[in-house]
Image: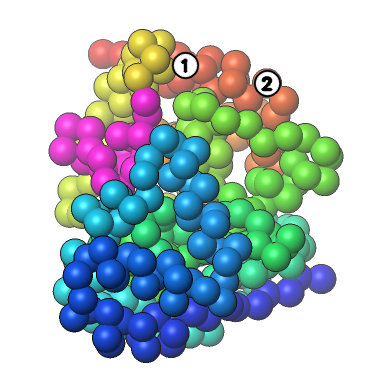
Amino acid sequence: MSKCSVIDTFPQFRTFWRTAQQKSLDEQINGWASNYMAPWPELLEKQRENYASEGEDWRHVAKERVFPFLTERLPEMERAYSNLQGLCALACAEAQEVLGFESEVIFVIYVGIGCGAGWVTRYQNTPAILLGLENIAECGWSDTATLKGLIAHEMGHLAHFHWRAEKEMPTGSGPWWELYTEGFAQRCEHLIMGQENWHMGVEEGWLRWCQEHRRWLAREFLRTVDEGEPVRRFFGSWYQIEGKSQSGYFLGCELIKRLEKKRSLKEIALLSDWRERMRAVSYTHLRAHET
C-alpha cells in the first residue's frame, strides 16, 4: 500500500532567513549549509554531490544564481508553500492510482541551491521527491494547478524507476536516457492530470512554438548528441534553445507517444534498448514532419 510522508524544512528556513538576509552573500551561503541544513545532512550532501557530478562549484552557483534573489522570491516561495499543504499526499495518491503502482514516497520541501524544482531520488533509503522552493518560485510555478502538474511529473519518474527496480533493471545516463526518462515522466503527467498538461509551459506561446518546431527540435537534438554537445539547453530552466527553455520535455513526450502506438506505458518503462529505441523514434518523428 502506498504511504506518503512529508519532511517540511520551510519553517526553519524562515527563521534562518530573518537574520541571514541582512548578511553578506558568503555569510548567507555558509549559514545555509551550517545552520539551516544542519538537521538534514543527507539533503545537504545530495545537493553538493549534484553539482560535483557536473564539475560545478556549488558555492559559486549559489552565489551567482540563487542567494541574490531569495529575498525578492520569498513571497512566491510562501505562496508555493501554502499551496503545497495537503497537495503532496493528494497528488501522490492520485498518481499511484492512475499509473497502477504502489510505493512509499517521502516529499521534502526545502529551499536549496538550484538543483531543481522537483527531483526524484532516494532519501532516508526511501523513494523521495525533493521540492525546491527557490526553483519553483524562479520558474513561476507556485499556483496549485502548476504544482500538481509538477508533482505528477515527478511521480511519473518515480513510477519509471519503481518498475525498473522491480525487474532489477538499471537506470541509465546520458542524453538519450534524459530524453527517454523526461519524456516518460511528461507523458505520465498528462495521464495523471487527465489532459495534456505542461507544468513547464507557463510562458505564453511555449506549447505552440514547440508544436510548430517539432521537426526542427528532433533534428537539433540528434545533431547535438552526434556532435557531443551537452543537451542541458533542452531541459534546464536556466538554459534556452531559440529563446525557449525546457523544450526537451515536449520532444521527449512526443517520442514516448510514438512508442505507445505499439507498447503499453509499462512496457516502455522496461525497455532495455532504450538508447536505440529513442534514436530510432527520433528519426521516425523527424521524417513524419518532413514537408
Q: Which corner quadrant of the image does residue 72 belong to?
A: bottom left
Q: Which corner quadrant of the image does residue 111 belong to?
A: bottom left
Of marks 1 and 2, which one's residue comes earlier in the chain?
Answer: 2
Residue 79 falls inside the magenta stretch: no
Q: Is residue 161 above or below residue 212?
A: below
Q: In this view of the protein, which residue sits in the foreground, 290 or 28?
A: 28
Q: In this view, does 169 lie above or below 18?
A: above
Q: Nearer the viewer, mark 1 or mark 2?
A: 2
Q: In this view of the protein, which residue sits in the foreground, 211 or 48?
A: 48
Q: Is residue 191 above or below residue 251?
A: below
Q: In this view, does 255 lie above or below 102?
A: above
The quadrant the C terminus occupies is top left
Residue at 32% x, 38% y is: 247
Residue at 38% x, 70% y is: 32
Which residue range is magenta in the image?
230-248
Residue 238 falls inside the magenta stretch: yes
Q: Do the residues labelled 1 and 2 touch (CB within 8 Å)?
A: no
- Residue matched to label 1: 284
Say which amino acid is labelled 1: Thr
In the picture, measured across the screen, residue 17 lies left or right of residue 85, that is left
Neighbours of disc 1 within 10 Å: few (<14), some (14-19), many (20+) = some
- Residue matched to label 2: 273
